[in-house]
Amino acid sequence: MKRGRDADAASSALARIQRDAADPGVNLMPALLAAVTAYVTVGEITAALETVFGTWAERAIA
Amino acid sequence: MDRRGAWHEAFETAPSRDAVFDTMSGVALDPVYGPDDGEFPGQWPYTRGPHASMYRSKLWTMRQFAGFGTAEDTNQRFRQLLSAGSSGLSTAFDMPTLLGCDSDHQLALGEVGRAGVAVDTLADLEILFDGIDLGSVTTSMTINSAAPTLLAMYVAVGDKTGVPRARLGGTIQNDILKEYQAKKEFIFPPRPSMRLVTDAIRFASAELPRWHPVSISGYHIREADSTAAQELAFTLANGFAYVESAIKAGLAVDDFAPRLSFFFNAHIDFFEEIAKYRAARRIWARWMRDEYGALDPRSMQLRFHTQTAGVSLTAQQPEINIARVALEALAAVLGGTQSLHTDAFDEAHALPTEQAARIALRTQQVIAHETGTVNVADPLGGSWFVEELTDELERRAETTFAYLGRLGGGSMLDGVIDAIEQGWFQSEIADASYDFQRRLDAGTFVLVGVNGYTEGDGIAPSTLSIDPVSRNANSLASPR
């Protein structure tokens, strides 16, 4: 799948997700729509958002 | 006009199902009972139900949740369901998809397609809905952390198959707050996650008028072993947080609130469950009007899906679960649910066999067609006991809202997020779970087949087994 898709479209869609995620005033849905249409994977989208948002680890309950 | 007169007018304009509404002895039944100046269904604050005619117009939707294996497998199941007359699809995703992981990720090993369908790219969703007109079905998608991505995929499938966005109907769970509190399938920290939820609400409100962008879910809070009072209070507090977040993002409350829906548990404490649904409707109506300025009655009318309590099922003597599910489902119907999933009796062991799944659905059909429960709206309204229990659950919920409001300096959004960051919900639920376990251990709560009446334990049912699908079976590995 990754070999068959348009590589430039996929990487620019991922770059747009990172750009839009960094600006809280922008709605991320159009960037996500562009990315899925370019056959970007769920895992690639998660990774791109993680670079901006970070991840969450739960603290232990006392 | 008195309240009965106003109700009667609304009732007369509602459609009636083609059914007989008499008792088995031939007693003709009114659609609802109560004093002329009392509250009626479809009337503020909607304690007795969101609609004047309730099940006389339309039974609840019997929506059973399914999904397994590859997109092809689930597509086959969807087509069978549709050809058998179902109009709603409900999609379960596998754990890697729920956590935003691809099927070839090392953490996905052994989990691909096990508990739901695996989705890596748009190609999987194209296969999942192949041959299905997205303009004529409604689809429920149970996913949270990766919800905006899956919503984007669904819209993309619609775009590619020429279905106007305005015709796409369905629900995406997209309730991230309860993930931190109970279900634990989160990826990002709470605040950026809230931004993603809110972006989906904004998008849906602008582009998808038939879409429910959040299903505010108490179900999983209860499955983590909270009490009914906690389920009620925490779920509604989460609902207020989403409303506040969307208003802060610039949306007008009546532009999105009618599309919010709820998802509650139906547990075994029969009357408390019924009181919980009644209290939920009343609290939501009051807060939406008085705190958030809603003017459209649809913004104030809480509508909900219910699922019977998986956590109440026992592995011991599993056929007893058929009785538990029937009682729980009956409580949901007496509480006025709009949609219901009944668990299968073998689910403490595995995903249901076909026979167990059929019995679960038949249980709903017995309630709908044999018990007469559906003839009269809110049949327990006016019961001194149920009314008092409804009031008490409302008082307890208000105490929680007051605490969260103080924590957030007047903002329920900040209060809920602060409480999550401090682990407050999590420890409240853990305490409740511990208390219940102590009651079981002490024998002050008798759980049939577990700490009492255990003759017959140890006979395991024959169960369904699903092999995880090959990691190469998905779109990632297909040469397009």
Image (spheres, rainbow, N blue to C red):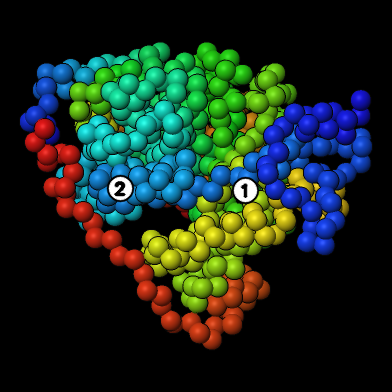
Q: Earlier in the sequence, mark 2 or mark 1?
A: 2
Q: How many marks?
A: 2
Q: Secondary structure at mark 1?
A: helix
Q: Secondary structure at mark 2?
A: helix
**Residue annotated with mark 2:** B76
- Residue type at mark 2 is Gln
Q: Is residue B64 visible?
A: yes
> With A45 as the anchor, is B417 left or right in this view?
right
Instruction: Please tell me how crowded label 1 is: few (under 14), some (14-19), or many (20+) other residues with Cα within 10 Å.
Output: many
- Provide residue B164's location: percent of width, then percent of height: 39, 19
- Provide residue B156's location: percent of width, then percent of height: 31, 25
**Residue annotated with mark 1:** B230
Q: For this rendering, which residue is in front, B231 or B357?
A: B357
> With B118 as the anchor, is B332 left or right in this view?
right
Identified at 52% across, 51% down, the residue is B341
Query: Is B454 rendered above or below residue A39?
Result: below
Q: Quadrant of the N terminus of chain B?
A: top right
Q: Quadrant of the C terminus of chain B?
A: top left
Label 1 chain ID: B
> With B361 as the anchor, is B476 left or right in this view?
left
Query: Is B397 rendered above or below residue B358?
Result: above
Query: Is B279 rendered above or below residue B268?
Result: above
- Residue type at mark 1 is Gln
